[in-house]
Image (spheres, rainbow, N blue to C red):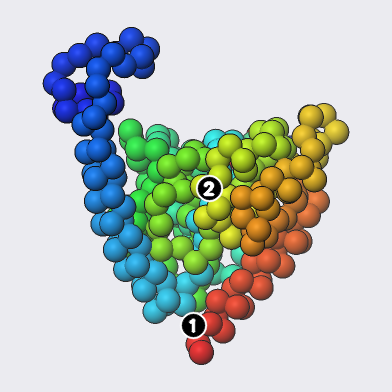
Amino acid sequence: MCGVCGCGTESHEHHEHGHTHNHSGSKKIIEVEKDILYENNLLAERNRGYFNAKNILCLNLVSSPGSGKTTLLERTLTDLKDKYPFVVIEGDQQTTNDADRIHATGTKVTQINTGKGCHLDAHMILHALQGLKPAENSILFIENVGNLVCPAMFDLGEGERVVVMSVTEGDDKPLKYPDMFHTSHLCIINKTDLLPYVKFDLDKAIENAKKVNPNLEIITLSCTSGEGMTKWYDWLKEKSYAYNEAVMS
Ligand SMILES: Nc1nc2c(ncn2[C@@H]2O[C@H](COP(=O)(O)OP(=O)(O)OP(=O)(O)O)[C@@H](O)[C@H]2O)c(=O)[nH]1
Ligand SMILES: [Mg+2]
């Protein structure tokens, strides 16, 4: 199989992705992808069952690289550590940088390095949970690999998916990467302190996000200045409470 495009032909030339051969064999790619997602979805349900049984609120933080996921966590964990028992799973292609930052807040954390992989999957989370052993009633944050495409496809068993975008990325991102915004419950628009310096139409960004997902909740904030952080904390409190109620009933 060709390692570049996955077609059945063993050897042929790719000129900067300008394919000169017939792509009728590309059906195979779709079959493989379906199988991977089927297996992932089974394991995600297993994780979800574990979270329900232990009354753990699990949040999957997704975004493009650098939108502020770790900064949001650092601030949240520092501000709320006396209120909730938190645990964190960090996902990155390489390094333990983000896990080190979370560890510095005094929170229990595990790092997953995906190597060549561009997303976390349910199997990785299952393994991480076996080591992490989160306590009953805790809040588990999973910081996914910075990538607005692949993580959208992989259910990890989370209760809430939170997409973080920042004002330096452009207000058209929800339209360009619709799957991520379509599958999320909350959209945080971060770095509002930079709004005076960048060309970013906040109303347009919200309109674009709602176009893709009318049910998407939106919170605008700045992790740096702290503006809007209480809206996020209120949301977290509400979800934590709602989650507890739902599981108890
Ligand atoms: N001005 C400003 N900068 C911010 C804000 N939040 C985060 N940053 C900066 O943005 C950069 C990236 O932040 P991170 O928290 O590492 O982003 P991330 O999403 O975790 O990045 P990856 O894990 O690599 O995907 C850092 O330099 C932060 O200091 C904010 O609200 N305002
Ligand atoms: Mg990070």
Tell which residue pokes out farthest to the right in this image. Answer: 196
Residue at 55% in and 36% down: 65
Q: Position of residue 210 (x, y in %)?
A: 68, 53
Using the image, determine if residue 249 lies above or below residue 70.
below
Q: Is residue 102 visible?
A: no
The residue labelled by disc 1 is: 247
Using the image, determine if residue 28 lies above or below residue 57.
above
The residue labelled by disc 2 is: 180
Using the image, determine if residue 78 lies above or below residue 28.
below
Using the image, determine if residue 183 lies above or below residue 94.
below
Q: Residues within 10 Å of mark 1 (few under 14, many from 20)?
A: few
Q: Is mark 1 within 8 Å of ligand 2?
A: no
Q: Residues within 10 Å of mark 2 (few under 14, many from 20)?
A: many
Residue at 66% in and 73% down: 238
Q: Is residue 164 visible?
A: yes
Q: Amino acid at mark 1?
A: Val
Q: Nearer the viewer, residue 29 or 224?
A: 29
Tell which residue pokes out farthest to the left in this image. Answer: 10
Nearer the observer: mark 2 or 1; the answer is 2
Q: Quadrant of the N terminus?
A: top left
Q: Amino acid at mark 2?
A: Met
Q: Position of residue 66 (x, y in %)?
A: 59, 36
Whole-number angstrom distance, CA of label 2 to CA of label 1: 26 Å
Residue at 55% in and 76% down: 243
Question: Number of marks in the image?
Answer: 2
Residue at 39% in and 69% down: 48
Q: Nearer the viewer, residue 37 or 166?
A: 37
